Image (cartoon, rainbow, N blue to C red):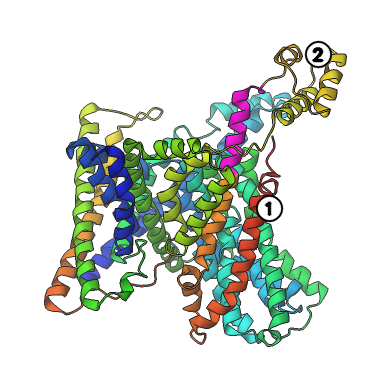
C-alpha cells in the first residue's frame, strides 16, 4: 500500500472511531500515531516526536490566548455583564413586537464581544433572558430557538476562539480575521432580529407585549454596559492597533473583567474556584483536540495527501466556485454532527491547501498599484509631479503601469508575488469567515445541533420538537447570509486595508 | 476513592488557575512597563524631565524581560494541570448521536475499551514527556533570554501530567470493575460545558 493510500483510508477510519464515541482528540491522536508507525515502519519516530511535541503544543504562545479568553468570559458573567447587556437591549427593544426576543439576540451579540465561545454565550444568556421571555408570554420553542441561534453570535463576533485556531492553522493574522468577522457578525444579529419580526407576524400568539420604558431609564441601562464596551474596545481595538499581541490582549481582557467582577462583588473564593473548574474543563478539552490534530496532521503531511489533493483539484479544471460550494456543503453536513473547533482542526489542513490554490482574483494589479501609489503620494515623494499624474490617469483608465514606470516612480510592493500574497490572504480570511458561519449553522440544525440541546435542557417545560420547529426560521436566515457573503466577498473584506 | 480523585483533580485545576492568573498579571505588568517606557522615551517627557525619565528607565521601567518565555513555560503546566479534571468529568468532546442507537451492553463495552485505550495513551504521553525532560536535562538547553534550563518547565508539566495519567488509569480500572460487577462507581457524566 502506498503512503497516499494509507492517508486516504485514514479519514474514514477516523470518522468511524469518532462516531463510535471515541473522544475526538483521542481518535485523531490514535490514527495519527498508528499511521506514522505504518509509514515509517516502526514506533520510534512517533514516540520520539511525543518527547517534545506534547510540551511544545501546550506551551504554544498563540494558543495561550484560549484559556485567557475562557476565563474572561466567565469573569464577565460573574461581573453581571450578561445581565447588564440584556437589560440595556431590553429597555430599547422590549416594547416592540417580538422585542424581548430581539433584545436577547442583541444581548448575545454584545456578550459575544467579550466571550469567544458559542455554547458559553448561549448558556449564559439563557440564564438571564429565558425567564424574562417566558414572563412576557413568549412561547417556549420560540424562546429557546432564539437563544440557541443568538449563541452562535458568540463565536462570530470577535474575540473568537475558533478564529484563533483557524488563524494558526492557515498562518494568517489574527487581528485581520477578527476585523473581517465584524460586519458578518453584525449582519447575523440584524438577520436574526428580522427573522424574529417575521416569526411574530406569522405566529402572533408566540409573543406577548411589554410596556415601553422611559428614556431616562434607558439611559441608565445603557450607562451600566460601559464595562463591556470598555473591555471590547481595549481588547479588539488594542490588538488591531498593534498596542499588543492577541495573547497580551486576552490577558488585558481577562484582567479587566476580573477587576470588574471583583468590584461588582461577584468574585469570591468560591466563584473563583468555580471559574477555574469551568475554564479547566474547556481548556483541557480544546488543547487535547489540538494535540490530537497536530499528530494526525503531521501524519497526513507525510503521506502528501493534502498536497496531492490540492494539485489534483488545481489541475482538474473545476470552477473555483464549484469547489468552494462543495466544501461548504460538506461543512454544513458535518457541522450537524461535530463541534466547530474539532471540525476546523480536522479539515482545514486538508481543505486549506485546496482553497489556497483556487483563484478568486479579489484584487487586480491595477487596484494594488493604485493603492500603493496613493500611499506613496500621502507619504510624500520626490518623483516628478507630471509622472505621478500620468500614472494616476493610466490607472484610472484601468491600465497597469509598466515595470519601468513603477521603478521610476519608486513604487514598492507591486510585484506579482505581492499581489499573489494579498489575494491568498484575502481568500484565507473570506474562506475562514464562511466556514465559521457554516459550521455554526450546524450547531442549531435539528435534530443534532448542540446549542439546541444545551438551551432546551434549561427550559424543562418546552419540548425539543417545539424548539426544532422555531429554529428553522433562524437556519433559513443563516443560509441566506452565507449565500450573501459567498456572492459578495466584499462584505467580509471591506474593513481590511489593501 | 472517587472523592479523593475528585479532590486531587480539583486541586490541580485550582493550581493551574492560579498559575494562569499569575501569567495574566505578569503579561499585563509587562505591557504597562512597555507603555510607560515608550512614554518616558517620548519627545515630550525627554524635553520636560530628562533626568526623571533617565532615573526611571535605569530603575527598570520597561517590558518584563522574557515574559514571553515565562508565559510559554507556565502555559504548558496550566494545560497539563487542567487535564485531570477534564478527564475525570468526561468533558472531552465526542459525538454520541450514533452510539445512542446501540444497545446498552454494546455502549458499555465501547466505553470500557475507550477508557482502556485512553489510559494507555495518557500513560505513553506522560512517559515520553519524562523521556523528553531527561534529554533536555542531559543537553543542558536553556531558554534564550532568561537562560533558565528548559527541563525545569518540563518537570513542572510532568508533575501535572502524572496526575492526569493516574486519573486516566483510575477511570479505566473503574470502568472495568463497573463492567465486571455491574454496579456503577463513576457518577453519570455531567453535561459537557465548553
Determine whether A347 is above or below A374 in the image.
Answer: below
Q: Residue A237: say if magenta.
A: no
Res. A175 visible in picture:
no
In 3D space, how far apart are the residues under numbered discs 2 and 1 (Cα atoms)?
Answer: 39 Å
Quadrant showing the N terminus of chain B: bottom left
User: Which residue bears the numbered disc 1?
Assistant: A183
Classify residue A388 as left or right of residue A93. right
Q: Is A418 a magenta residue?
A: yes
Report x, y in % for residue A308. Answer: 40, 36
Mark 2 belongs to chain: A
Q: Which residues are magenta?
A: A413-429
The mark found on residue A382 in the picture is 2
Structural crowding at the residue carrying mark 1, measured as other residues with C-alpha within 10 Å and reported as few (<14), some (14–19) or many (≥20): some
Q: Residue sitting at 39 percent across and 46 percent down?
A: B75
Query: The residue marked by circle 1 belongs to what chain?
Result: A
Instruction: Give the percent coordinates (x, y) of residue A482.
Output: 62, 57
A487 or B79, which lies in front?
A: A487
B26 vs A146, left or right, is: left
Per the image, label 2 sits on a secondary structure element best described as loop
Main secondary structure found in the magenta portion = helix
Amino acid at each position: 500500500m502506498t503512503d497516499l493510500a494509507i492517508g486516504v483510508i485514514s479519514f474514514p477510519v477516523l470518522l468511524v472511531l469518532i462516531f463510535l464515541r471515541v473522544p475526538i482528540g483521542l481518535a485523531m491522536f490514535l490514527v495519527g500515531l498508528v499511521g506514522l508507525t505504518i509509514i515509517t515502519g516502526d514506533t520510534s519516530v512517533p514516540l520520539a516526536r511525543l518527547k517534545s511535541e506534547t510540551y511544545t503544543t501546550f506551551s504554544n504562545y498563540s494558543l495561550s490566548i484560549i484559556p485567557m479568553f475562557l476565563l474572561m468570559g466567565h469573569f464577565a458573567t460573574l461581573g453581571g455583564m450578561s445581565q447588564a447587556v440584556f437589560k440595556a437591549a431590553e429597555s430599547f427593544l422590549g416594547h416592540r413586537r417580538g422585542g424581548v426576543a430581539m433584545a436577547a439576540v442583541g444581548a448575545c451579540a454584545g456578550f459575544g464581544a467579550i466571550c469567544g465561545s458559542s455554547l458559553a454565550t448561549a448558556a449564559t444568556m439563557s440564564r438571564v433572558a429565558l425567564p424574562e421571555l417566558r414572563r412576557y408570554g413568549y412561547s417556549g420553542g420560540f424562546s429557546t430557538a432564539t437563544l440557541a441561534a443568538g449563541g452562535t453570535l458568540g463565536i462570530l463576533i470577535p474575540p473568537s476562539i475558533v478564529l484563533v485556531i483557524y488563524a494558526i492553522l492557515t498562518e494568517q493574522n489574527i487581528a485581520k480575521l477578527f476585523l473581517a468577522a465584524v460586519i458578518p457578525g453584525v449582519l447575523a444579529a440584524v438577520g436574526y432580529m428580522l427573522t424574529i419580526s417575521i416569526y411574530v407576524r406569522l405566529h402572533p400568539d408566540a409573543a406577548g407585549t411589554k410596556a415601553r420604558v422611559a428614556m431616562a431609564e434607558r439611559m441608565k441601562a445603557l450607562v451600566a454596559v460601559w464595562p463591556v464596551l470598555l473591555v471590547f474596545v481595549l481588547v479588539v481595538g488594542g490588538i488591531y492597533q498593534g498596542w499588543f499581541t492577541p495573547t497580551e490582549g486576552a490577558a488585558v481582557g481577562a484582567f479587566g473583567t476580573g477587576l470588574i467582577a471583583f468590584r461588582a462583588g461577584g468574585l469570591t473564593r468560591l466563584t473563583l474556584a468555580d471559574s477555574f473548574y469551568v475554564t479547566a474543563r474547556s481548556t483541557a478539552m480544546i488543547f487535547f483536540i489540538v494535540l490530537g490534530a497536530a499528530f494526525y496532521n503531521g501524519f497526513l503531511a507525510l503521506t502528501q495527501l493534502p498536497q496531492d489533493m490540492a494539485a489534483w483539484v488545481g489541475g482538474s479544471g473545476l470552477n473555483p466556485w464549484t469547489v468552494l460550494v462543495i466544501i461548504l456543503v460538506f461543512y454544513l453536513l458535518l457541522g450537524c454532527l461535530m463541534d466547530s473547533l474539532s471540525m476546523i482542526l480536522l479539515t482545514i489542513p486538508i481543505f486549506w491547501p485546496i482553497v489556497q490554490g483556487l483563484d478568486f482574483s479579489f484584487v487586480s494589479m491595477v487596484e494594488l498599484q493604485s493603492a500603493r501609489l496613493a500611499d506613496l503620494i500621502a507619504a510624500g515623494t520626490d518623483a516628478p509631479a507630471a509622472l505621478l499624474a500620468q500614472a494616476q490617469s493610466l490607472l484610472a483608465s484601468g491600465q497597469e503601469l509598466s515595470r519601468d514606470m513603477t521603478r521610476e516612480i519608486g513604487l514598492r510592493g507591486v510585484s506579482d508575488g505581492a499581489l499573489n500574497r494579498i489575494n491568498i490572504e484575502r481568500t484565507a480570511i473570506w474562506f475562514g469567515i464562511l466556514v465559521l458561519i457554516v459550521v455554526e449553522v450546524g450547531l442549531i440544525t435539528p435534530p443534532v445541533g448542540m446549542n439546541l440541546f444545551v438551551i432546551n435542557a434549561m427550559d424543562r417545560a418546552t419540548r425539543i420538537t417545539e424548539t426544532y420547529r422555531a429554529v428553522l426560521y433562524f437556519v433559513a436566515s443563516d443560509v441566506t447570509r452565507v449565500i450573501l457573503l459567498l456572492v459578495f466577498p466584499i462584505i467580509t473584506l471591506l474593513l481590511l486595508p489593501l | 476513592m472517587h472523592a479523593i480523585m475528585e479532590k486531587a483533580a480539583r486541586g490541580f485545576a485550582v493550581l493551574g488557575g492560579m498559575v494562569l492568573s499569575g501569567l495574566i498579571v505578569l503579561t499585563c505588568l509587562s505591557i504597562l512597563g512597555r507603555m510607560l517606557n515608550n512614554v518616558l522615551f517620548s519627545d515630550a517627557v525627554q524635553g520636560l524631565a530628562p533626568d526623571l525619565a533617565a532615573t526611571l528607565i535605569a530603575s527598570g521601567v520597561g517590558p518584563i524581560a522574557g515574559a514571553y518565555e515565562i508565559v510559554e513555560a507556565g502555559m504548558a503546566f496550566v494545560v497539563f494541570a487542567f487535564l485531570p479534571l477534564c478527564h475525570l468529568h468526561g468533558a472531552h468532546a465526542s459525538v454520541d448521536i450514533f452510539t445512542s442507537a446501540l444497545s446498552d451492553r454494546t455502549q458499555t463495552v465501547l466505553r470500557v475499551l475507550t477508557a482502556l485505550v485512553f489510559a494507555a495513551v495518557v500513560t505513553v504521553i506522560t512517559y515520553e514527556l519524562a523521556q523528553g525532560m531527561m534529554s533536555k536535562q542531559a543537553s543542558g538547553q536553556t531558554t534564550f533570554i532568561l537562560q533558565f534550563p528548559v527541563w525545569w518547565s518540563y518537570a513542572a508539566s510532568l508533575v501535572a501530567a502524572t496526575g492526569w495519567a493516574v486519573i486516566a488509569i483510575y477511570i479505566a480500572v473503574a470502568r472495568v470493575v463497573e463492567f465486571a460487577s455491574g454496579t456503577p462507581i463513576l457518577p453519570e457524566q455531567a453535561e459537557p460545558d465548553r
